[in-house]
Amino acid sequence: MDKQELVRSIADLRKQRNAVIVAHNYQRDEIQEIANVVGDSFALSKFCAKSPRDVIVFCGVHFMAESAKLLSPGKTVLLPETDAGCPMAEMATAGALREEKRKHPGAAVVCYINSTAEVKAESDICCTSSNAIKVIRSIKQDEIIFVPDCNLGSYIAKMVPEKQIILWKGFCVTHHKISAEDVKKVRKLYPDAMLLVHPECRPEVTELADFIGSTKQIIDYASASGAEKFIIGTEMGVLYKLKKDNPQKQFYLLSQGLLCPNMKKTTLRSVYEALRDMKYKIELDEHIMEKAKIPLDRMLRVD
């Protein structure tokens, strides 16, 4: 099938299966085009929790589809590419987190949504890059173990200095490799452009930014701003919506290395096959599901 035939077949199957297709902002352009909803982790989490459809096709990576299943345990959640993982999520394990909790018995555990269900099950509350500061401020304890992103954790520590943030040694491979030198180079090329970056970038990069925010916050900021030129410091998939919503503005990627291979695995064919064959279903241990849903529910109540 060519692209048009795939798109038509996906639309037919979506109706037959009573399904909804959700896609992260980092997905391929053609995946964002066919999705019912496109957004960051927080927006998609809220949507999936309220979706009335029987089937959720999650165009993203494994931890995102897991989160959708946790929030909608009675629904069928499909991940079109079963090996679309997240290196950052794999940098934290439930066993290692239990060990860290023993070292800090009075600390609360805040778990970035970019984590496995097993790690969420060991946490007190989840957060996303959109609501992390609000979540941290809502916690009574002064000492907080933040897992697994050390860069987002460092940013939070700077914004909420009254809390003692214990950082995990995890990071997003895509964002972490960007350096201050990369910023200096691109600033020379586009001196009149504003720099908007994701808090998963290193502190040396966020310190040089004009704005720091989640993918949705970056999109909203650029759309509302009177400026016309922007350097974007997050995964390149976000450029699709930025350019679509703001055709009169110019956007430059901070680095050509800002590409997540896992986010780009999903294709029109894999979405079609997921709906046709009802694959790949997210299955989780019932005990883990019960425990891991609690911190997600707590996060949704904060906002």
Image (tube, rainbow, N blue to C red):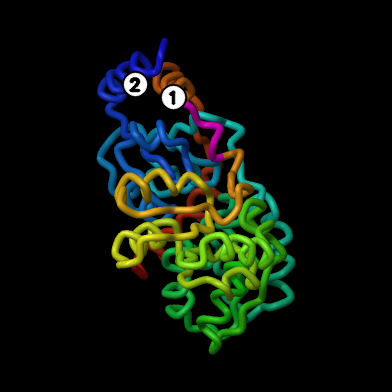
Mark 2 residue crowding within 10 angstroms, few (<14) / some (14–19) / many (20+): some
Compared to residue 262, the image places residue 292 above or below, namely below
Q: Residue at x 32, y 66 (%)?
A: 225
Q: Which residue is mark 1?
A: 268
- The image shows residue 165 at horizontal and vertical percentages of 62, 78
Q: Is residue 164 left or right of residue 7?
A: right
Is 155 magenta? The answer is: no
Task: Quarter of the image for the C terminus: give it.
Answer: bottom left
Residue range corresponding to the magenta coloring: 263-267
Which element carries disc 1, helix, strand or loop? Answer: helix
Task: Tell me which numbered mark, 2 or 1, is placed earlier along the sequence.
Answer: 2
Q: Residue at point 51% right, 67% down?
A: 191
Residue pointed to by mark 2:
7
Q: Is residue 296 left or right of residue 265?
A: left
User: Element at badge 2?
Assistant: helix
Question: From where the camera sits, is residue 148 visible?
Answer: no
**What secondary structure predominates along the stretch shown in magenta?**
loop
Asked if 41 appears above or below 125 in the picture, the reply is: above
Q: Position of residue 256 (x, y in %)?
A: 61, 47
